[in-house]
Image: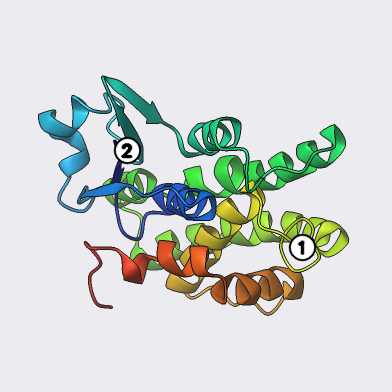
Amino acid sequence: MKPTLYSAWRATAPYRVRIGLALKGIAYDYVPVNLIKGEQRDAAYKAVNPQGLTPALDLGDGQVLTQSLAILEWLEETHPQPAILPTAPLDRQRVRAMALVVACDIHPLNNTRVGRALDKLGVSKEDNLAWVHRWITDGFDTLEPMVSRYGSGFAFGSEPTIADCCLIPQVYSANRFEVDLSPWPAIRAVAERAAAHRAFQAAHPSQQPDAVPV
């Protein structure tokens, strides 16, 4: 039985999981959740994920996984090849640290919920965009020397890891919000490498069934 992924085409958290599933070669069914229309708050979806966030990975028999990094870790534990974490504990820590810069320090401050909260507080579109740019810039300033030191094609080493599962969606988001990526050549190089990789191509927002032309 294939798992079912509840996803939103350009939301970065489910994008991470789509990359992980593609890297592991796991087929899945796709159920779109329209975040703009608020479907994540509907009773039908909250019966799947009471937190009302995407992604959710339904394994069947009442087993539903939530939280993108926890899902990626589960994928690694249950489908160890190809690996998306290195072998050495210190290297694994570094990969996780890169992933968490995105998942904890950048994304939570820039997601749909926060943007709407800022709108309700009367923050202008210009100031809202400046807010997004600030946190992406801070995060990428942190990541750039890490990727430069440990990367060799991808964020850590020569093969994709959980760090890339998080970084590439964040680069997509940065491009969406017109962040100038020129200060971060190492990150840009990883994004270019990923763009030529089949798993990242398959997971790209433009390839999802609920994608909207932009």
Q: Position of residue 96 (x, y in %)?
A: 70, 40
Work out whether residue 110 or residue 160 is closer to the camera in this orientation and state it.
160
Q: Quadrant of residue 185?
A: bottom right
Work out whether residue 116 or residue 149 is closer to the camera in this orientation and state it.
149
Q: Quadrant of residue 191?
A: bottom right
Furthest toward the front, the residue is 1
Q: Is residue 96 left or right of residue 8?
A: right
Q: CA distance from mark 1 to mark 2?
A: 29 Å
SS for callout 2: loop
Q: Mark 1–mark 2 contact, CB under 8 Å?
A: no
The quadrant of the picture occupied by the C terminus is: bottom left
SS for callout 1: loop
The residue under label 1 is which amino acid type? Ser
As displayed, is residue 185 above or below residue 86? below
Q: Position of residue 170 (x, y in %)?
A: 53, 59
Q: Is residue 209 left or right of residue 200?
A: left
Residue 36 numbered mark, or none:
none
Residue bearing the label numbered 1: 158
At 48% across and 43% down in the image, what residue appears? Answer: 108
As displayed, is residue 60 above or below residue 40? above
The residue under label 2 is which amino acid type? Pro
Q: Is residue 205 left or right of residue 60?
A: right
As displayed, is residue 147 above or below residue 77? below
Residue bearing the label numbered 2: 3
Q: Position of residue 204 (x, y in %)?
A: 42, 66
Work out whether residue 10 or residue 61 is closer to the camera in this orientation and state it.
61
At 59% across and 69% down in the image, what residue appears? Answer: 194
The quadrant of the picture occupied by the N terminus is: top left
As displayed, is residue 191 above or below residue 72? below
At 77% across and 38% down in the image, what residue appears? Answer: 92
